[in-house]
Amino acid sequence: MKIKDGFIIRKVGGQNVVAAVGKRSLEFNGIIRLNETGLFLWEQLKKDIDAEALTAALLEEYDIDEASAKKDVSDFIEKLKEADLLA
């Protein structure tokens, strides 16, 4: 899975915010703020990567246990699916 084309990250008021560009801005009316971990996962999802690889990347980057990493990845993916941001 990966992030659909037409979405970028912008810093707004010190926060990382997902912004739709081009024709995606006609389809996407929401706002998504990303914390540091969310930004890291977003960057990973620029590549075609599965949940297992995302979890492994999270474990490598942060001091977190595997169960927490799996839950964080699952929650993040679910939110992106709900917002229809995944290809």
Image: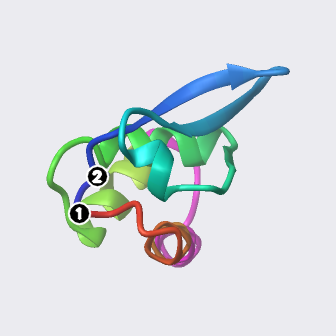
What kind of residue is marked 2? Lys
Report which quarter residue 64 is drawn in. bottom right
| Residue marked by disc 1 | 87
* Relative height, residue 72 to residue 22 (above, below): below
Report, in whole angstroms, how far the alpha carbon at label 1 lies from the one at label 2: 5 Å
Which region is colored magenta? 61-75
For residue 5, side relative to residue 76 (left or right): left
Circles 1 and 2, Cβ within 8 Å, touching? The answer is yes
Crowding at dot 2, Cα within 10 Å, few <14 / some 14-19 / many 20+, comes out as: some
**Image spot of residue 69 (x, y percent):** 51, 67
Q: Residue 4 bears which disc, if any?
A: 2
In which quadrant will I find the N terminus? bottom left
**Image spot of residue 85 (x, y percent):** 40, 60
* Relative height, residue 27 to residue 15 (above, below): below
* Relative height, residue 64 to residue 5 (above, below): below
Residue 62 in magenta stretch: yes
Q: Residue at x 59, y 45 (%)?
A: 37
- Judging depth in this view, the residue of 3 and 73 nearest the camera is 3
Q: Residue 28 bears which disc, if any?
A: none
Please report whichever mark, 1 or 2, sits nearer to the chain's N-terminal start: 2
Residue 58 in magenta stretch: no
What kind of residue is marked 1? Ala
* Residue situated furthest left in the rendering: 48
Crowding at dot 1, Cα within 10 Å, few <14 / some 14-19 / many 20+, comes out as: few
